[in-house]
Image: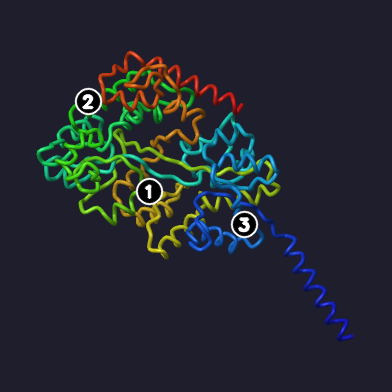
Amino acid sequence: MKRIGKMLVIFFILTGVLALAADVVTIKYANWNLGTPEENNVERQMIQAFMDTHPNIKVVIDDSIKGDWNASLAAAAAAGTMPDVFMLTTVPDALANGWLYDLTKTVATDPDWSKIPSNITSTIKYNGKVSAIPFAMHFMGYFMNKDIFTSENIAPLKFNYTTTQFKNAVLRLTKHSKGIVGLSEEIQVFEWYPASVSFKFGFYTFDGKKFNLDSQEFIDGFNLAKSFVKAGAVYSALTDEQKTAIAGSPSADGWATGHIALNYNGTWMVPDYKKNLSFAWDFVGIPGGRTILVLDYLGISKSTKHIKEAYEFAKWMSFSKQGYLKRLELAKKSNTILTTPPLMNDAELVDKYQANVDVPGLKEAYRNIGRAIVEGFKFVPGYAQARWNAPTGIKIGDKVNASIGDVLWNGTKMDLKIEDIAKQLNDLANQKYQEALKAIK
């Protein structure tokens, strides 16, 4: 009898183990930020932490997705081996290829989804359907060398400064004889200027339905950028001789060496700035109390057999409170700064993020996140063509058929009248937008 009893106990234990094993779901994940197993970076640690807290889900890294990202995904789709969750180069590309699961019903039942600012979630809604998940967010705008402002008796800019204050600062803080220049680059000015003077525009004049490159606001922004170059107020546009006179070498980093008052960059630079800059600095966004957001996105495969588990994992890696707290914990353990703000507008997360980065201007930027504009490359259909690649038929220098990017890049440095070609550029940009939009309908 005792032997039979022992056998029954063993039977029930084995049955339970097998049942538990049968309940474990395996999902595949592909991302280009995972490093190597030996490095065991924060992203890999996040995956392990997810599995530790979700014992019913096993996450396998799909190393077959690499190199040309979209080509690798296309090959996986053709072979029926798509990863369940994967990073997106752009959302429109993934939609056009038919790779993405419709998440509309999934997010509708998740109360945390509504805690993500609507100007972020609206970027991934196409034809009334939610098509992706915001993965990471960076702020982009101007970093200010406070020491230059102070030394020249000019009040440092404060968040919500005006375009007039910006213009005056750039010009007044350009003094080659003192080794200072107002602005790092001019090429971004016309991208953000329309949104800084009118809330009807987003980044690069996109308003949700079309580009507006023929608007007076875009023309004014372009001409402002051109005026900065003409005044010698743009470091990147100076001659090698001028850069040498100011910073000691034509290859010197004018910002890092303390010669530029306002430098356009993203919050991914904060750790470097904290470690290497020898002057007082802060983040001030762009005029009008706005900030530019740069977003990355995750997709869930339309072919996944485990949508619940795939979404839970994608949420953990991106916007969940528990996941973000774990990121902060891992950053602290590794003595690094977590530069990506929380996607979910939760008071505890925001406070912990701000304590982590300790940059006053970033606190103001997050406080005004509802007014932020999103850079369009990863979510606006046809953006790359509309901003950079589409040939215009316009001659610029030795380029007979310059791309729209070439026209805008060179036009601020030469006697180009943007008023004469604004409609042509706008028609071209919207043509490329409509072509890409049709591909995802």
Tell me how far mark 1 sits from mark 2, CA to CA.
29 Å
- The residue shown at (21%, 31%) is 167
Picture coordinates of residue 4, whole percent (x, y):
88, 82
N-terminal of the pair, mark 2 or mark 3, is 3
Is the C-beta separation of discs 1 and 2 under 8 Å? no
- Residue 252's label in the rendered image is none
Q: Answer whether residue 388 is visible to the viewer in this image.
A: yes
Separation of residues labelled 2 and 3 (CA atoms): 54 Å
Q: Give x and y (percent) for residue 82.
A: 65, 45
Task: Name the residue located 60 percent from the left edge and 55 percent from the top edge.
Answer: 61
Are there few (<14), some (14-19), or many (20+) residues within 10 Å of tag 1? Answer: some
Q: Assess disc 3: are there few (<14), some (14-19) or many (≥20) residues with their C-alpha within 10 Å of its C-alpha.
A: some
Q: Is residue 197 left or right of residue 44?
A: left
Pinpoint residue 156: horizontal percent, then vertical percent: 19, 42
Tell me the distance, in whole angstroms, between the alpha carbons under discs 1 and 3: 27 Å
Q: Is residue 301 above or below residue 37?
A: above
Q: Secondary structure at mark 1?
A: helix
Please state the total of marks drawn on the protein image. Answer: 3
What amino acid is labelled 3 in the image?
Val
Q: Amino acid at mark 2?
A: Ser
Residue wearing tag 3: 59
> Mark 1: which amino acid?
Trp
Disc 2 residue crowd, few under 14, some 14–19, many 20+, Cα 10 Å: some
Element type where label 3 sits in the image: strand
Asked if the residue under mark 3 is in contact with the one under mark 1, i.e. CB atoms within 8 Å, the reply is no
User: In the depicted view, which residue is nearer to us: 155 or 348?
Assistant: 155
| SS at circle 2 | helix
Q: Quadrant of residue 237?
A: top left
Tag shown at residue 268: 1
The residue carrying mark 2 is 227
Q: Would residue 156 appear left or right of 48 to someone viewing this image?
A: left
